[in-house]
Image (tube, rainbow, N blue to C red):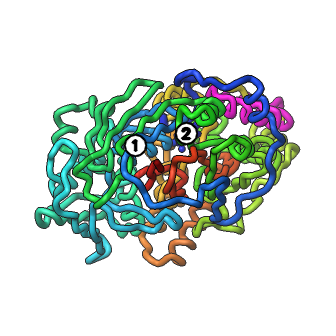
């Protein structure tokens, strides 16, 4: 996961989970006086309530879309991969959405499923998902999109040794082709989460011809059926995409192309907008809102998001295998102070992996981890750590991540926990934690998934990529997760997911910290940006004004 995902910041993954590589990008020519003026204001206070959005400047005064132009974006992380099946960072999505189309799409405000490459879908029985595919679509290399392509993609995601999304499709037993543009996914059990799962990585269709011909090189030379075609990727510097004239949505995209400048340091990225070197920056920190508001010509959009800053715990390793230790760490954290100091009060304390604005949020778990250093010490002593606990964590090198680390180190210290961080780039440290199993935990973020069952499955199911222990947390959790996907009514699913969240909380499998708001900044020439609850930008509705 994880962005610093911020994981990866959710790229590596935010982005999952992004910001932790070296500073890059062209020099920004801004006077020292201007920088001091823009970057040293008092913090903004307040809260992002519900799913409301706010825009400053003329963000809402947008004219008719204009076709043409290249959008220059400040991106906070180098991708882990540009192949949707092999990547590991949530922050990869901003790049993937430009190149790949998904079988199912989602509504920006609610994340409800909508038609994509699959025009329609249905469940003829509770163990079959029938997909009716869009006709006349081709991949960027001219390969036709059809039932054979879907079968290839699903089977590749499920069986490839390099696939990181096997858990996404765990309930898919096989794919049956019923016609040139119709497939049936045969399931091991009822799975109401599957349509939204197919709006994410598992539903991003790659060209079978390109994937077979390029092999591992497809990570760096992706071929999809999205709004733009891949042009180039210079590591830690720039990614370029250009318009696909054969894109299947009439009139889209508006932009001729997009150039992503990889700038992990968020202040540097924002300054590149002030200097008019870039047009758009995302995954910004709440305390940068005032900088945007004071900068001449910039505008911002703020919205609620599923993006959860958290410490991933390897709950099958060493001292962390003891639930009392994991509970102690959760009680050691003062979330209200964390939000105040790292988010200028604009975030929401996290008690679980879903924010209060989400339909599956369980309000009974609010404040389930009250800040209590003495209780934390008592639990550690009961677990055999009377002299305290040494905790080796991994993290990212960007300024915002280091600030979060310093706050947590002090909070842990008061509870008798000696926390140490080993820092590096998002890609490096995420791989060390999730793949090489180094460290006790990772300070990063979960960048969210359209369906909550998928989020919990990817983090806590046995052998899931974001479960560093690779062990089963408990049979009860496994059963509860499967049950949450077997119901098709919203109230039934809400009750089932409440049970999932209760088990995860009781077992203290993670240290959720806070939900920052989505914050993007854009120049006065950018129109049409539409934020989503997922908090990961899509660019196909953006246009550049004259």
In the rendered image, residue 409 lying in the magenta stretch gets the answer yes
* Mark identifier at residue 7: 2
Residue at screen point 74% across, 30% down = 34
How many marks do you count on the picture?
2
Who is closer to the viewer here, 448 or 238?
Answer: 238
State the image quarter where residue 440 is shown.
top right
Image height of 421 relative to 50, above or below: above
Using residue 2 as the reference point, say whether residue 98 is left or right of it.
left
* Helix, strand or loop status at disc 2: loop
In the rendered image, residue 295 lying in the magenta stretch gets the answer no
Residue at screen point 26% across, 49% down = 225
State the image quarter where residue 197 is shown.
bottom left
Q: Identify the residue under disc 1.
A: 69
In the rendered image, residue 227, in percent from the top left (x then y), is placed at 32, 50
Question: Which segment did they paint magenta?
Answer: 387-415
Residue lying farthest left?
Answer: 179
Who is closer to the viewer here, 276 or 318?
Answer: 276
In the rendered image, residue 3, in percent from the top left (x then y), is placed at 56, 38
In the rendered image, residue 459, in percent from the top left (x then y), is placed at 52, 48
Using residue 127 as the reference point, say whether residue 164 is left or right of it.
right
Say which label, 2 or 1, has the lower sequence index: 2
* Helix, strand or loop status at disc 1: loop
User: Which class describes the residues within 10 Å of circle 1: few (<14), some (14-19), or many (20+)?
Assistant: some
User: Which class describes the residues within 10 Å of circle 2: few (<14), some (14-19), or many (20+)?
Assistant: many
For the question of whether residue 475 can be seen, the reply is no
For the question of whether residue 12 can be seen, the reply is yes
């Amino acid at each position: 996961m994880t962005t610093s995902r911020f994981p990866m910041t959710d790229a590596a993954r935010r982005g999952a989970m992004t910001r932790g590589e070296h500073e890059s990008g062209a020099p920004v020519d801004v006077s020292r006086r201007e920088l001091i003026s823009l970057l040293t204001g008092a913090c903004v206070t307040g809260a992002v309530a519900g799913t409301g959005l706010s825009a400053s400047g003329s963000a809402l005064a947008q004219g008719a879309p204009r076709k043409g132009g290249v959008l220059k974006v400040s991106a906070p992380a180098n991708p882990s991969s540009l192949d949707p099946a092999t990547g590991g960072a949530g922050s990869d999505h901003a790049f993937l959405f430009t190149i790949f189309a998904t079988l199912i799409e989602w509504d920006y405000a609610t994340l409800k499923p909508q038609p994509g490459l699959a025009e329609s879908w249905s469940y003829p029985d509770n163990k079959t998902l029938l997909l009716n595919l869009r006709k006349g679509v081709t991949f960027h290399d001219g390969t036709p999109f059809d039932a054979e392509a879907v079968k290839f993609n699903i089977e590749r995601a499920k069986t490839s040794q390099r696939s990181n999304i096997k858990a996404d499709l765990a309930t898919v037993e096989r794919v049956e082709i019923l016609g040139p543009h119709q497939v049936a996914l045969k399931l091991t059990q009822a799975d109401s989460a599957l349509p939204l799962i197919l709006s994410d990585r598992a539903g991003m269709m790659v060209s079978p011809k390109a994937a077979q011909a390029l092999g591992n090189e497809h990570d760096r030379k992706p071929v999809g059926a999205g709004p733009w075609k891949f042009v180039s990727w210079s590591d830690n510097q720039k990614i370029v995409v250009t318009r696909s004239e054969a894109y299947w949505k009439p009139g889209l995209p508006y932009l001729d192309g997009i150039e992503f400048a990889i700038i992990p340091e968020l202040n540097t990225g924002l300054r590149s907008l002030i200097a008019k070197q870039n047009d758009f920056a995302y995954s910004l920190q709440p305390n940068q809102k005032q900088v945007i508001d004071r900068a001449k010509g910039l505008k911002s959009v703020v919205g609620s998001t599923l993006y959860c800053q958290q410490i991933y715990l390897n709950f099958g390793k060493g001292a962390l295998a003891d639930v009392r230790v994991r509970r102690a760490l959760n009680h050691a954290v003062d979330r209200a102070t964390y939000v105040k100091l790292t988010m200028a009060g604009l975030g929401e304390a996290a008690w679980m992996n879903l924010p209060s604005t989400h339909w599956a949020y369980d309000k009974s778990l609010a404040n389930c981890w009250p800040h209590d250093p003495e209780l934390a010490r008592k639990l550690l002593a009961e677990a055999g750590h009377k002299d305290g606990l040494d905790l080796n964590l991994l993290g990212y090198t960007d300024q915002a991540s280091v600030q979060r680390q310093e706050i947590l180190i002090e909070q842990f210290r008061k509870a008798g926990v000696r926390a140490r961080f080993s820092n590096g780039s998002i890609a490096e440290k995420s791989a060390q934690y999730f793949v090489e199993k180094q460290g006790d935990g990772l300070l990063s973020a979960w960048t969210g998934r359209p369906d909550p069952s998928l989020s919990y499955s990817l983090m806590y199911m046995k052998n899931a990529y974001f479960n560093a222990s690779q062990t089963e947390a408990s049979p009860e959790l496994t059963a509860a997760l499967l049950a949450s996907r077997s119901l098709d009514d919203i109230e039934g699913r809400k009750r089932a997911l409440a049970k999932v969240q209760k088990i995860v909380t009781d077992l203290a499998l993670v240290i959720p910290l806070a939900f920052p708001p989505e914050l993007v900044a854009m120049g006065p020439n950018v129109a049409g940006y539409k934020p989503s609850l997922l908090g990961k930008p899509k660019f196909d509705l953006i246009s550049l004004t004259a």
